[in-house]
Image: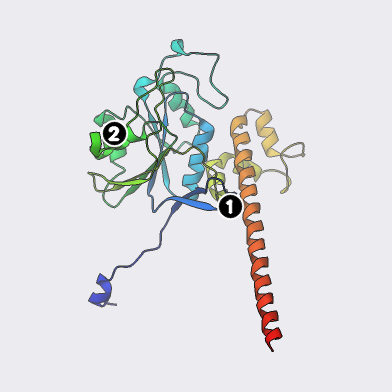
Amino acid sequence: MLLDPKQAQRPRRLERFSALTRQAPGSRFATQVLAANVDTLLIVTACNQEFNVGRIERYLALAAEAQTRPVLVLTKADLAPGIATAPGPGPAPGNAPVQGPQSFIEQARTLGEHLQIECLDARDPHQLEPIRKLCGPGQTVAALGSSGVGKSTLINGLTGLSGEAGQQVGEVRGQDNKGKHTTSSRSLHPLPAGGVLVDLPGIRELQLTEAGDGIDDTFAEITALIADCRFTNCRHTNEPGCAIAAALAAGKLNKRRWENYRKLQGEQKVYDQAKADRTKRDGQRSTSKKTQRRLDKEDQH
């Protein structure tokens, strides 16, 4: 069927096909959209004490729920110290030891066999080439990560901008190779390859919203084991025939991943309950208002 030329030229808003969302800071149920219609999410972290596999899994669940392709970008590879220079008594729980880039890559590979991982120095144009291939015509790419991981340097390298025209870049602290928080708002950047890049501000808190499917996809090996439990209501503690307990005892399931899965699922239940309670309260208030209007009309007669 041919369209009327006037209708074809009329501006119209298309429905979004994906949305990266989180709980709005300070709220138990409100949703904040970080970006929409994103084809690829660059999960940016650094090869230093900021690297945390539990946080990366949270980002992966966010991408999976939005059906957005995740790419893990390990920045500051040039600053990753060797084992011999590791300071202090050791890293915080869940963080990587202070080692060379290969250590961070090996840990990242445990997060999914199909996860694309790029370890680079964002100041080197040649090392950015695999990222540029994701930014072709019609592609929308978003960069997400904690403050000071090198997102601004990465974006300047991809856009080819610098100085006042580019993103502000903070200095690196010498004691831990971490940068400072420099980006405080979202921005959209056209890329030379034809795509666009959304720069999201440094995330201090990422509480997931309706991400049950995303969590299951991120921890696929765990959801597969749960399906093998003898009882459908297995609590995975002391129940007979528990596939999770058996896998943990045999060393076939990573204990840290299991604990993080339970943590994210627990947060999801809290969010779902808070949302359900709010919906119930709103429904009760609506019913109460309708009842009051009906009584007011009866009184007028």
What amino acid does circle 2 point to?
A: Leu
Looking at the image, is 84 positioned above or below residue 135? Answer: above
Outermost top residue: 84
The quarter of the picture where residue 70 lies is top left
Circle 2 residue = 128
The answer to whether the residue labelled 2 contacts the one labelled 1, judged by CB atoms less than 8 Å apart, is no
Asked whether 69 or 140 is in front, the reply is: 140
Q: Give coordinates of residue 168: x percent, y percent.
A: 31, 34
Neighbourhood count class around disc 1 (C-alpha, 10 Å): few under 14, some 14–19, many 20 upward: many
Identify which residue is drawn at 64% across, 48% down: 270
Q: Find the residue positioned furthest to the bottom.
A: 301
Residue 9: quarter of image: bottom left
Does 220 sit left or right of 299 as displayed?
left
Q: Secondary structure at mark 2?
A: helix
Task: Judge whether 3 appears above or below 45 on screen.
Answer: below
> From mark 2 to mark 1, how far is it between C-alphas?
38 Å
Residue 236 image point, x, y percent: 71, 39
- Residue named by callout 1: 29
Crowdedness near tag 2: few (<14), some (14–19) or many (≥20) residues, C-alpha within 10 Å? some
Residue 187, position as x, y percentages in the image: 34, 46
Pick the residue in front: 16 or 101. Answer: 16
Q: Position of residue 192 (x, y in %)?
A: 22, 44
Q: At label 1, which amino acid type do we have?
A: Phe
SS label for mark 1: loop
